[in-house]
Image (cartoon, rainbow, N blue to C red):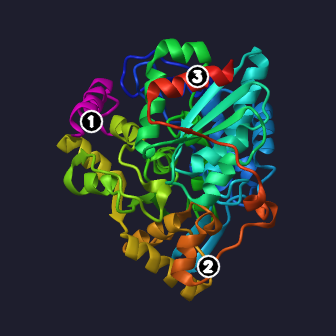
Amino acid sequence: MTMQYHSTRGTAPALDFEGAMLAGLARDGGLYVPAEIPVMPPADIAALAGRPYEEVALRVMQPFTGLSEARLGDLIGRAYAGFGHDVRAPLVQIAPSHFLLELFHGPTLAFKDFAMQLIGQLFQDVMRRRGERITIVGATSGDTGSAAIEAFRGLDNVECFILFPQGRVSEVQRRQMTTPVEPNVHALAVEGDFDDCQAAVKAMFNDHAFRDRVGLTAVNSINWARVLAQVVYYFSAAVALGAPGRSVGFTVPTGNFGDIFAGYVARSMGLPIDRLVIATNRNDILHRTFQTGTHRKEGVQPTISPSMDIQVSSNFERALYMAYDRDGRAVAQLMEELRAEGGFAISQGAMEALRDIYTSGRASEEETGATIRDTYARTGQTICPHTAVGVKVASEITADSPMVTLATAHPAKFPDAVEAATGHRPALPPRMADLFERPERLTDVPNDLGRLKSLIDERIA
């Protein structure tokens, strides 16, 4: 039977995997989640040990997709062929029971490549079979946008628009979005912060006439296929460290909650994850939520870990849906309170359910820089500021099982912060050595929904 996907707000029609992937955001404003999470028997998890990453991906993802093994396997193979490491997501030990999971060997040097390269293949496959075109509009705090543009550049059936906050991404991140020459990808620098960009994208999806006219779909972490692709590296890492024979913990630097929700899915599938640790920078709405039981927005403060400079954590809605026992009406009410009042209180039962699964911590700017410096001094390992937030939070947790911190980006994407901490300026990999010499192509736009929609209409025409 084909897996069905339901909206977190309870009133949109159920869709199959392909429909949920193409829709991105549900018609009722909610996010799609699988009607059930299939459990992988311990023997099947154990059998993943030593297998190529692509095979692990096929075994983990296939039950969710309804695609044949041959077709999905072919798309996975194409998606990861361009990665710069044969293991795809290698582990590196930095302390006796602490490991980094290097997720930056893809074409744009960030963990987003694992999902985006695969989504590019999936979308192109569907559109070719249907003979249709789609318009992708996404918001980025840095890494999603470059990964999306890299994944969709030059594809026949896709027009891709990425909104990013002007002056609030690193130069490397910006240039990765603005230097591709293919005419079907468009980098839009918005006057505002990431939450402004994300709000504009959500508003476009909720304008159903515009959505239908341009064939709109989303590749932000609200897209279920993004989350599903990220589930895979939890399995590859945990099995390498002895799962299912022993438990493993994961610390995840996160702002939008998508990457750590993927860990929840892996855990629900039967992977023995004993701790999922949310690591935030000083934009710590998620940490404050777990400390207080109240989820309330404050202003976004720029940091040296800009991909986490977020106060509207879209994927947290999926975690709430699970914590409220899949009660879409309750989630819709919370999301309305967030929109109208800037926050909401979580019920005691739901908060207990969340704390059973997740813990949290935060790192200040000073602690982030100190962690980059100390890790380099102790191990010779250079880490990016986002990874440093995770390492700092993970270092405060004591447990018997191994801890894996997700190393979400290559340090060369944030050379100024790394150099300030270590005195050492990390170099880009050879395949990107000429990035600063390539001409840029971008459009400055005001934070105005009408202007943004008009620009998209004009470019598509």
Q: How many marks?
A: 3
Count residues near mark 1 (Cα–Cα under 10 Å), then give few for <14, some for 14-19, many for 20+. some
Label 1: element kind: helix
Residue 338 numbered tag: 1
Quadrant location of the C terminus in the rendered image? top right
Lower sequence index among marks 1 and 2:
1
Q: Where residue 162 sits: x, y (%)? A: 59, 38
Q: Give the residue at x 29% y 53%.
A: 355
Q: Is residue 356 above or below residue 320?
A: below
**Rendered image quadrant of residue 412:** bottom right
> For numbered disc 2, what is the local secondary structure?
loop
Tell me the kind of residue under disc 3.
Answer: Leu
Alpha carbon separation for disc pair 2 and 3: 42 Å
Visible in this render: residue 217? yes
**Residue at the disc numbered 3:** 216
Rendered image: mark on residue 429: none
Q: Are marks 2 and 3 in contact (CB under 8 Å)?
A: no
- In the rendered image, residue 303, in percent from the top left (x then y), is placed at 43, 63
The tag earlier along the polypeptide, 2 or 3, is 3
Q: Rounded to the nearest whole Å, what is the CA distance between mark 1 and mark 2?
A: 40 Å
Q: Residue at x 37, y 68 (%)?
A: 363
Helix, strand or loop at label 3? It is strand
What residue is shown at x 75% (from left), y 41% (from top)? 76
Given residues 280 and 69, the one toward you in this image is 280
Residue extending furthest toward the bottom? 377
- Residue 38 belongs to the span the image colors magenta: no
Query: Of residues 373 and 184, which is closer to you in this image?
Result: 184
Boundaries of the magenta span: 323-343
Type of amino acid at the residue the image marks with label 1: Leu
In this figure, which residue is indicated by the disc labeled 2?
381
